[in-house]
Image (cartoon, rainbow, N blue to C red):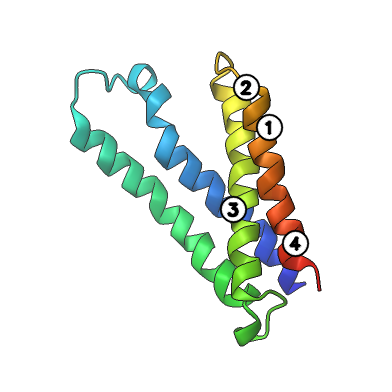
């Protein structure tokens, strides 16, 4: 159960972080932030990122073997990276449909997925 909850929390935290990091690229027209300057965008992103930490920290604490969880520190980190990429791909496909995905982008993702495979290999 701890493993499943850890992965769920990592998905939630990365969803908030992706929105905080890249959402402002779409918000400029949505929230009329085009002429507001950088600070309002930074503050809004920080507010969103707060929720990322509300899920990321518990995910790491409950998932870490040192706290009775199923994952080593390295497994946690690489799992987080592949989840981050998965969330980013979904975000890009939904909100930035004009972004061109090329073969080398997918090849890089496959390489990261291979890294996750190898880190879980005994």
Q: Is any atom of residue 28 visible in this view?
A: yes
x 62%, y 60%: residue? 78
Q: Earlier in the sequence, mark 4 or mark 2?
A: 2
In percent of width and height, residue 84 lies at: 58, 47
**Which of the two labelled residues, at mark 1 and mark 3, occupies the earlier sequence position?**
3
| 76 vs 20: above or below | below
Q: CA distance from mark 3 to mark 4?
A: 14 Å
Task: Please give left or right for residue 37 compared with residue 84 in the image.
Answer: left
| Residue at x 47% of width, y 47% of height | 17
CB under 8 Å between discs 1 and 2: yes
Could you classify mark 4 by the number of other residues whose Cα lies within 10 Å: few (under 14), some (14-19), or many (20 or more)? Answer: few
How far apart in space, not on screen, are marks 4 and 2 (Cα)? 26 Å
Label 1 residue SS: helix
- Vertical placement of 121 versus 96: above or below? below
Which part of the image, by quadrant, shows the C terminus? bottom right
Q: Residues within 10 Å of mark 1 (few under 14, many from 20)?
A: few
**Percent coordinates x, y for residue 81 in the rendering:** 59, 53
Q: Secondary structure at mark 4?
A: helix
**What residue sits right under mark 3 in the picture?**
81
Q: Kindly report which numbered mark, 1 or 3, lies closer to the viewer in this rendering.
A: 1
> Which mark is first along the chain, 4 or 1?
1
Distance (Cα) linking label 1 and label 2: 8 Å
Q: Which mark identifies residue 101? A: 2
Q: Could you give the CA–CA distance between mark 3 and mark 2, rounded to whole angstroms?
A: 19 Å
- Residue under label 1, please give it: 106
Which quarter of the picture shows residue 4?
bottom right
Label number found at residue 2: none
């Amino acid at each position: 159960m701890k493993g499943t909850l850890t992965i769920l929390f990592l998905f939630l935290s990365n969803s908030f972080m992706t929105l905080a990091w890249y959402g402002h690229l779409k918000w400029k027209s949505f929230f009329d932030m085009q002429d507001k300057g950088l600070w309002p965008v930074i503050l809004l992103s920080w507010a969103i990122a707060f929720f990322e930490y509300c899920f990321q920290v518990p995910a790491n604490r409950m998932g870490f073997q040192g706290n009775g969880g199923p994952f080593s520190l390295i497994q946690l980190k690489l799992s987080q990276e592949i989840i981050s990429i998965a969330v980013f791909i979904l975000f890009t496909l939904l909100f930035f449909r004009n972004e061109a995905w090329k073969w080398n982008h997918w090849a890089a993702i496959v390489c990261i997925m291979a890294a996750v495979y190898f880190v879980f290999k005994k």
